[in-house]
Amino acid sequence: MVFESNVHFDEVANYYERLREDVYLDDIMDVMKKYTTKNDLLMDIASGTGRISTNVCRSLNLRLILVDKNIHMLNVAMKKINMQRKMDKLINMNIYEFLKDGGKTDNVKINDIDIFTCFNAIHWTGLGLFKKLEEKMAPGSLFVVLTRTKKQNNKSFFGLNFPKFADKETRLFSLDQLLDEFKRCNLSVVDTKFLKHQILQKKSKLLEQAKKKSYSTFSLYSNEEYEKAMRIFKDNISSMPEMLDVRYENLLIIGKKL
Ligand SMILES: C[S@@+](CC[C@H](N)C(=O)[O-])C[C@H]1O[C@@H](n2cnc3c(N)ncnc32)[C@H](O)[C@@H]1O
C-alpha cells in the first residue's frame, strides 16, 4: 500500500516529539562531531520537527536548514527555532522539487552545504534521493543517513509485539541495499555504526505510541485491521510488567562525495 505522508504527519505533528524516543541522539552527535567543523552548514532532509537535527546543530555549533514537505511538522520546528536560534532556516518543500529547482530557493545555495542528513526518512524519500542529491552535492560534502533496517524493525518492540507490524512495513531497506546505493552513487562510505540501546520504558507510553500512531507503520493498516491488531497488542502486553526493557536498534551511515 502506498500512502501520502502528509495525511499521517498532519495528524501526528503535535505530539510526534513527545512520543518518539531519542535514545540514539548522543551516539549521533559523537559520530558526527568527528566529521564536522564549527559553523558548517547542515541541511536536514525530511527534517520533520527537527527533533534530531536541532539538537545536533546546537550541540556541535552548526548552522541548520530544515527541509520538509509537511507544514505542520515544520511549524513545530519553527517554534523551537524561534526560541533557540534565529539564524536557522526552514523550507517547506518536497526535497525532489527543491533539488530539481537547483537548490536555490530562499537564497540557499546547495553548493554551500557541508552536510546533508536524512534521519528516519529514507523509507519516505526512497533510494532515488541518493542520485538526485549526489548530482548537486559539492565535493567533500557529507550525506548522513539514520534509519532502521528491515531486520532491526522486525526485532523492535512493536515488531515483536504488535500484530503484523514487521510485515506491514515494507518500505525499509537492508544494510546492503543502503551501502550499495552509496557506492553506486559515488559516495564513499566513511562510517557505518549500528546503534543499540536498551531502556526501561513505561507500558503506558508504548500503548500511547501505538494508539497515536507515532510510527507511520501504524497508518499502513486499514481501520479494521488496526483495531483488531490493537486489541491483540493490548492483550499481549497485559501480563507484562509496568516498566518494560525495550531495545532500540538503528543504523547510521555517513557517505562523502569525492
Ligand atoms: C518519520 S518523519 C522523520 C522526521 C525527522 N527526520 C525525525 O527523525 O524525527 C518523516 C518526515 O519526512 C517528511 N517527508 C516525506 N517525504 C518527503 C519528501 N519527499 N520531501 C520532504 N519531506 C518529506 C515527512 O513530512 C515527515 O516529516
Image: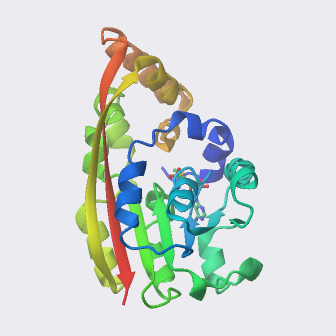
Quick one: 135 or 144, which is closer to the camera? Answer: 144
Q: Please tell me which residue is depicted at 74% across the width and 48% down the height of the picture.
A: 79
What colour scheme does the image use? Answer: rainbow
On the image, the x and y values in percent for residue 55 come to 54, 53
Q: Please tell me which residue is depicted at 25% across the width and 48% down the height of the picture.
A: 151
Quarter that holds the C terminus? bottom left
Residue 127 visible here:
no
Give the number of marks.
0
Above-or-below relation of 238 to 64: above
Above-or-below relation of 222 to 243: below
On the image, the x and y values in percent for residue 114 come to 51, 80
Residue 242 visible here:
yes
On the image, the x and y values in percent for residue 83 come to 74, 50
Quick one: 2 or 39, which is closer to the camera? Answer: 39
Judged left or right of residue 227, residue 66 is right
On the image, the x and y values in percent for residue 251 come to 31, 56
Above-or-below relation of 124 to 225: below
Q: Please tell me which residue is depicted at 59% across the width and 74% down the height of the picture.
A: 96
Q: Please tell me which residue is depicted at 32% across the width and 21% down the height of the picture.
A: 244
Judged left or right of residue 35, residue 247 is left
Quick one: 49 or 88, which is closer to the camera? Answer: 88
| Quarter occupied by residue 58 | bottom right
Quick one: 113 or 20, which is closer to the camera? Answer: 113
In the image, ligand 1 is in what quadrant?
Answer: bottom right
Judged left or right of residue 151, residue 16 is right
